[in-house]
Image (cartoon, helix red, strand yellow):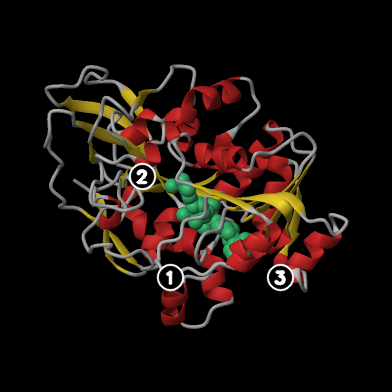
Amino acid sequence: MIAMNFRGPFRVRADRNKPDPVIEHPEDAIVRVTRSCICGSDLHLYHGLVPDTRVGTTFGHEFTGEVVEVGSSIKNLKVGDHVLVPFNIACGVCPFCKQELYGNCHESNPEATAVGGIFGYSHTAGGFDGGQAEYVRVPFADVGPMVIPPDLDLDDAVLLTDVVPTGYQAAEMGGIKEGDTVVVFGAGPVGIMAAKCAWLFGAGRVIIIDQLEYRLEFAQRFAQCEAYNFRSLSDPVLFLKKTTDYFGADVCIDAVGCEAAGSTLQTITGRKTLLQAGSATALHWAINSVKKGGIVSIVGVYGPTGNLIPIGNVVNKGITIRANQASVKRLLPKLIEHIRAGRLNPKEIITHRVPLEEVSDAYHIFSRKLDNCIKTILIPPS
Ligand code: NAD
Ligand code: ZN
């Protein structure tokens, strides 16, 4: 089959001869992919920032597809079902899954100390191949995949595998109260979605910060929020203090993570420094611009282990930090309700549709934020 193939930092290609996946366990299913996305999380792998990302891995944790084969114990799926597949691989029965912490499943990645299993991520996330391919093996297929309701648009469905639940959970973890001022760092797909979702929790004011004008303009329209370019602010933290009567924001959301592509290119010189530092500028700003006793909600991914945060300020300000991988399965029913009611319109963020064979160009464009790219969908040959 054709599949995205990681060759090393900044080098990916379409491999035309990857063996088709097979059922390895009675609880597996094989899915023929109909759509997959490139995510900001893939960029951490692409940039070589996540330990144990092995050459030959197929990335892709956001995908929909048709079930073409099921293992002998599968009860909830049948061949021909069109499913959306959460990015978390979850067993459904471990103590964490029982609490609906599907991003922290123990069984899918028992050797890890932190994250559960994730499709198409590094071996620190279990070493599973992902969905930027024609076919993908889905472990624990009775747990994660959801048959796509007939009234749900396929573009909305694929965005429900990660970016919508992640944005929603970012707002949820912020504990937003009626009238709160919420600042979102990062106007990528995740940040834009977090800004949109902040209103659903009763925010009174939503501000988004980025460095890319086209994304800020889009965020302003899509999420009806205020948008500021940190490159035109001499001191983003001071600016945010001033605009909140020097109290600080009630809630700050980090939707950047370590080293987004923009900062790689524009603010950090040398890849080596970046690898060692795992820069966390947005998180520093979040901690320093939230009010005393406020909440910092982190969904940005930090691949390297040595990330530094201003922990003294966390203590002195009495800040609560909440962070996690999104628990996609837990959130799907309520997010589908929001879409049906017209309160969320995820597919508007899709700017690029690229044949899977052109995956290398697609990564280049998304990583460098060329051509006003927000969200890219890869389409396998039919
Ligand atoms: P993206 O790369 O498209 O967007 C990141 C944005 O952050 C860019 O627009 C960039 O210009 C901006 N940025 C860079 N430095 C900044 C700074 N200092 N302040 C403000 N903005 C800054 O990525 P995305 O797809 O939107 O994902 C965002 C983050 O969310 C990534 O770290 C990704 O790994 C993470 N993520 C987490 C989960 C989860 O479950 N926790 C799920 C999906 C994605
Ligand atoms: Zn993702």
Q: Quadrant of residue 292?
A: bottom right
Please tell me which residue is depicted at 27% across the width and 45% down the height of the picture: 133
Disc number for residue 343: none
Compute the Cα span from label 2 to label 3.
Answer: 32 Å
* Residue 24 percent location from the top left of the image: 11, 37
Q: Nearer the viewer, mark 1 or mark 2?
A: 1
Of 262 and 122, nearer the camera is 122
Mark 2: secondary structure: loop
Task: Give, as a three-letter code, the residue at label 3.
Answer: Arg
Of 127 and 176, nearer the camera is 176
| Mark 2 crowdedness (10 Å alpha carbons): few <14, some 14-19, many ≥20 | many
Please tell me which residue is depicted at 85% across the width and 61% down the height of the picture: 242
In the rendered image, which residue does mark 2 sit on?
61
Q: Quadrant of residue 342?
A: top right
Within 8 Å of ligand 2, the CB of disc 2? Answer: yes
Q: Quadrant of residue 215?
A: bottom right
Task: Give, as a three-letter code, the residue at label 2.
Answer: His
**Residue 249 visible at all:** yes
Taking 111 as reference, is 230 above or below it? Answer: below
Query: Which comes before the other along the chain, label 1 or label 2?
Result: 2
In the rendered image, which residue does mark 1 sit on?
306
* Residue 47 percent location from the top left of the image: 40, 67
Q: Quadrant of the N terminus?
A: top left
* Residue 69 percent location from the top left of the image: 17, 27
Tell whether 380 sits left or right of 259.
Answer: left
Tell whether 242 sits left or right of 150.
Answer: right
* Residue 199 percent location from the top left of the image: 71, 35
Q: Are marks 2 and 3 in contact (CB under 8 Å)?
A: no
Tell whether 178 sits left or right of 369.
Answer: right
Mark 3: secondary structure: helix
Query: Which comes before the other along the chain, label 1 or label 3?
Result: 3
